[in-house]
Image (spheres, grey):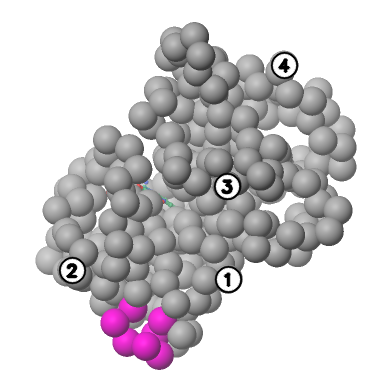
């Protein structure tokens, strides 16, 4: 996008219901030259909303190699997201960005990856998985741990069968499962007891702070450096561009310097996680 500070209208091409409170929106900028110039890295986000209602940060969750459209998965929690959920195919969402720093994929592609996703924090993992499936990098393997409260909370459920052909996918639900369920039961950290992790591993984690706390404690048992663990942080955001200071953590702005940080970079900042 030429001027990343401008919002541009994007048309809703498709809406897919993902869970009781989340929809997946496939969007395309109305101006062809804006769509053509829209490139992003896995882990980056846009500010999206409706003129007159406001906007909020949302991770881009399509493949970064898809250039004609892009996807946002939006959970209905409050004023803006409720309004977005009333929109239909053909309606318009205003989008500016992409913003922030995503995952350092060139560096990460030298390693096997463990993706840790909790609840709707899993959104941004979809880009990493779709890119991996498209690129098929030689020698690299991916393990995925995705944990939710109950089965209905899984995002992208209809893609699991395809993903499983390419990545080692482990799905876990907290609530009691039916006897023949294909899911593990428990919390995401329980998967560390059930699955042997790959060697030469880097970690990407997206989820609530409580998940980070317990996963980081488990990761200490493995030879993975703090610099090889990447966390995507969420903060309330207004500008998305390092101006309003709403998303400050220590010396960093989550919007501009993140939302992806290595654990090594933020582990000593009080309140960062
Ligand atoms: C970098 C980043 C990426 C994000 N990506 C996604 C995404 O891909 N999909 C998605 O559905 N949401 C995502 N979010 C969260 C999303 O931005 C908020 O849920 C949304 O802005 C809420 O707007 P609202 O007006 O509907 O809710 P509000 O009316 O503002 O708030 C409703 C409730 O949601 C809580 N809330 C609002 N914003 C946040 C937040 N950032 N984190 C935690 N709680 C919040 C409020 O405290 C309140 O309880 C992301 C947030 C960040 C910072
Ligand atoms: S959202 Fe304004 S500085 Fe980050």
Q: What numbered label is drawn on residue 193?
A: 4
Residue count near mark 3 (Cα–Cα under 10 Å), binned few <14, some 14–19, many ≥20: few
Ligand 1 has an atom within 8 Å of the beta carbon of the residue at disc 2: no
Q: Nearer the viewer, residue 118 or 63?
A: 63
Q: Residue at x 76, y 55 (%)?
A: 108
In the picture, residue 195 is in which quadrant? top right
Q: Under tag 1, what secondary structure?
A: loop
Q: What numbered label is drawn on residue 91?
A: 2
Mark with earlier residue (1, 4):
1
Q: CA distance from mark 1 to mark 4?
A: 35 Å
Left or right: 86 in relation to 14: left
Q: What numbered label is drawn on residue 65?
A: 1
Q: What numbered label is drawn on residue 162?
A: 3
Circle 3/circle 2 CB separation < 8 Å: no
Q: Is residue 233 visible?
A: no
Of tags 3 and 2, the one toward the viewer is 3
Q: Which residues are magenta?
A: 29-35
Q: Nearer the viewer, residue 261 or 198?
A: 198
């Amino acid at each position: 996008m030429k001027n990343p500070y401008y919002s541009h209208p994007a048309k809703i091409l498709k809406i897919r219901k993902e869970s009781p409170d989340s929809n997946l929106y496939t969007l395309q900028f109305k101006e062809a030259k804006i769509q053509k110039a829209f490139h992003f890295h896995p882990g980056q986000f846009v500010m999206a909303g409706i003129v007159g209602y406001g906007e909020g940060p949302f991770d881009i969750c399509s493949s970064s190699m898809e250039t004609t459209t892009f996807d946002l998965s939006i959970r209905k929690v409050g004023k803006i997201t409720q309004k977005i959920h009333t929109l239909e195919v053909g309606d318009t969402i205003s989008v500016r960005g992409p913003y922030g720093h995503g995952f350092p994929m060139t560096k990460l592609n030298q390693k096997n990856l463990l993706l840790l996703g909790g609840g709707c924090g899993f959104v941004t993992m979809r880009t990493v998985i779709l890119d991996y499936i498209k690129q098929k990098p030689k020698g690299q393997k991916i393990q995925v741990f995705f944990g939710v409260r109950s089965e209905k909370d899984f995002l992208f459920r209809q893609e699991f069968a395809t993903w499983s052909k390419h990545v080692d996918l482990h799905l876990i639900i907290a609530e009691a499962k039916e006897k023949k369920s294909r899911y593990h039961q428990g919390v995401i950290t329980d998967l560390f007891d059930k699955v042997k992790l790959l060697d030469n591993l880097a970690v990407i984690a997206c989820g609530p702070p409580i998940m980070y706390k317990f996963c980081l404690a488990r990761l200490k048992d493995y030879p993975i450096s703090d610099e090889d663990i990447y966390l995507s942080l969420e903060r309330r955001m207004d500008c998305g561009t390092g101006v309003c200071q709403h998303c400050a953590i220590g010396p960093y702005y989550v919007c501009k310097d993140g939302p992806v940080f290595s654990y090594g970079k933020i582990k000593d900042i009080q309140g960062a996680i």
